[in-house]
Image: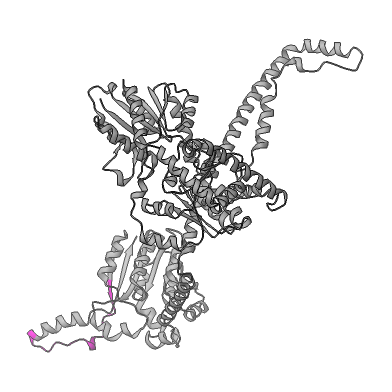
Amino acid sequence: MAEADEVQSLLEELRRTVEARREDGFYPAGLEDDLSAHFRRIVMHRVAPDLSRLDASMERLRAVPGLSPDRIPSDSGVPGGPALHRGLARLLGRQTQGILEQVEELAAALRAVADELSWAVRQASTHVHTDLIAQIDTLQDRLSALERQPAGDAGPMALAELSRRLEHLERAEEARTFRPSYSAEAFEAAFRGSQYDLKSRYRDLASRLAGCSPVLDIGCGRGEFMELLTEEGVTCSGVELDAGLAEAGRRRGLDISEGNGLADLAARADQSLGGVVLIQVVEHLTAPELLNLVSLAADKLRPGGRAVIETVNPQSLYVFARAFYLDPTHDRPVHPGYLTFLFRQAGFDGIEIDWRSPPPPDEILQPVGEPGADANYERLNQLLFGPQDYALIATR
Amino acid sequence: MQINQVMVSARPGDAITTSALELRALLRRVGRSEIFSRYVHGSLHHDVWELKDSDWLASESPEDDMIVFHASIGEPDVDRFLAGRPERLVVYYHNISPAELFYEYDPHLAGLLESGRRELSRLADRAVMAVAVSEFNAAELTAMGYRNVRVAPLITDPYRLKAQEPLLDMQARLAALEGPVIVFVGQLLPHKRPDFLLESFHVLTTYLQRPATLVLVGNHRLPRLSRALEELSRELNLDRVIITGAVPDAELAAWYGRADVFVTASEHEGFCVPPLEAMAQGVPVVARRFAALPETVGDAGILLDPGAGPIQMAEAIARVLTDDRLRAEMIERGHRRVGAYDAAAAGSALLRHLVEAAA
């Protein structure tokens, strides 16, 4: 076919053109090689490790000939030396052979180890390498997909929005935090009565902890109950959230630390306590904190140890009219039925409820001498004027 | 007796799948014939059975039946399947890409290509005949130990894209491209040397000052290679390179329609359908003298010597773009070449071989 020659001559012409343009510098020298090398660099910019030195060493190791007594040199510059060497070699022949066999055995084992290691290195460097590259490629793809997303400034905007909401939450939290301008001591002094009153009210409860050293008093205030415990011969320590009250207690020589009672309890070793006391404290706790308290008490009390929880009695409506809402830090009253249930669930037994602080007799409804009305007053008295407090005493 | 076909992966638009479907149509004229594939693309589920459904092959005398196996890549399941079948086996060899070029991009795929050649060698004694789609493939089969090797061109219809309705939005896009458009069609795989094309294009636009657009049309299944190509075109400032990924036939037809020249730098092809499709659409072809390409392109295109680098390819492209007489000549020869390729003749050649194998 005539055209075939035409194609050939066209190719010839192209070749000549390229040659001429290379010579006059139109195409820089090495252009194609540079381009090709550049592409190789792009593809291989994460190259596999160079194992050529390892390969060379392995080659040398394989080339080492076996051990033989013939290869021990017997030449010597001393007159008669070679004969002496040969004589000695003959005399020691058996021993030499034995040693060589052992060395040969060791060398064979070492060669096998070197082979295995060399194989393992190659496996690790090729397989792990390609796996890693595949993972890096996947990550790069995902990254570039992210970078290509149109809303370029969505990131900073989202951050500003997040920061604004965080500030809002912080302000709300700040507003919820109760920080009275009066001191806790002033509040106690105004509403709780004198220290002597308190001590006489709680002496019987402190006696329930005789023999329960050491006792932790959570929310110990100025430490009146701790003094009662000390009088009973019980060693005790206390935790109080209010710095002023804690300091007042310490001034009286009591072991009181300032802080969160639940955290303090959680930090104790398991079964390290003989007693845990909370006087007028649980009504300040949230529902989750109360759960936490009971389970911590179960962990930290030793077998036979006691928990004493004294709090307001929500079954008495008089409490709400008089005492409960006087203290703005009261969260919720705890029902004795619920508290009993919690301690039973936590594995305590011998749970008893001690009803305390009946309302003053002159406040309760008085019988009028009419049987029907008096029966009604009696029922109203039970509902309205039940005991103001109760203490739950649970034994581990 | 029945003749069924077994392949590894059936995908729409894939040259091997197309040839299997064409062959089945021929075989069904004389009897039952099915295609079984280890992997079947969703759109072909009504047409191609999955290999695990091969119970269907149940036949009264399977040793009289025949399996035509399309060999193109390794696949352990297919290898095991063929080993356990009593039918006579004909290997239809589409070629297996050289594994060594794939290792740095996808070791797993490279492993499959390598095992594909091993599996194919093992079948040499088992096969009653091997059919190659080109002399190049036939030589490889003989080297693997196959004795009864025949050549029958791949069954394909180079004019199939002519039937595609033009896409309106595509046309608007193509009209917006200024200057000549250079098109490559094929999967972005290392042996097709898309990097060589980018380098040629760099020479063409930077040194020869011929503004143009290079379009690489085809599936890219090696992310590392695609990324490297993108990086190379960015670094060489080739802002008029379009890498389309896999496209539907209508879009492919539109690219051929807009192309001023078709290029491929491929170094390994068992047949290579795209140059034929380009010629059918009146697009001159520039390629390199490798593997089966001289057989497929013949004297209709410019086949650069294997030693020619990207500069010579750029010069050849520039020449085709500027020399109207040469262009007209190449287009004319292309039409003649593709006209000489006769799908019906290719089909009947293959059928004749199969009948002989069955005798």
Counting from the top left corner in percent of width and height, residue A162 is at 45, 74
Query: Can residue A245 be seen here?
Result: yes
Side (left or right) of A224 relative to A57:
left
Q: In the picture provided, is A99 more to the left or to the right than A84? A: left
The one of B240 and A278 positioned closer to us in this rendering: B240
Answer with the quarter of the image where residue A103 lies: top right
Which residue is at a point 41% across and 51% down the rendered structure image?
B246
Question: Which one is in front, A128 or B252?
Answer: B252
Instruction: Return the x and y of residue B54 as percentages of the image width and height.
Output: 28, 32
Q: Compared with residue B71, is residue A144 higher up or lower down, i.e. above or below?
A: below
Q: Nearer the viewer, residue A144 or A136?
A: A144
Residue A76, x across and y down, in percent = 87, 17
Q: In the picture shown, does residue B218 fall above or below B155?
A: below
Q: Is residue A204 above or below residue B23?
A: below
In this view of the protein, can residue B127 be seen by the observer?
Answer: no
Q: Is residue A244 above or below residue A48?
A: below
Q: Quadrant of the N terminus of chain B?
A: top left
Boundaries of the magenta span: A354-372
Between residues A93 and A137, which one lies in front from this camera angle?
A: A137
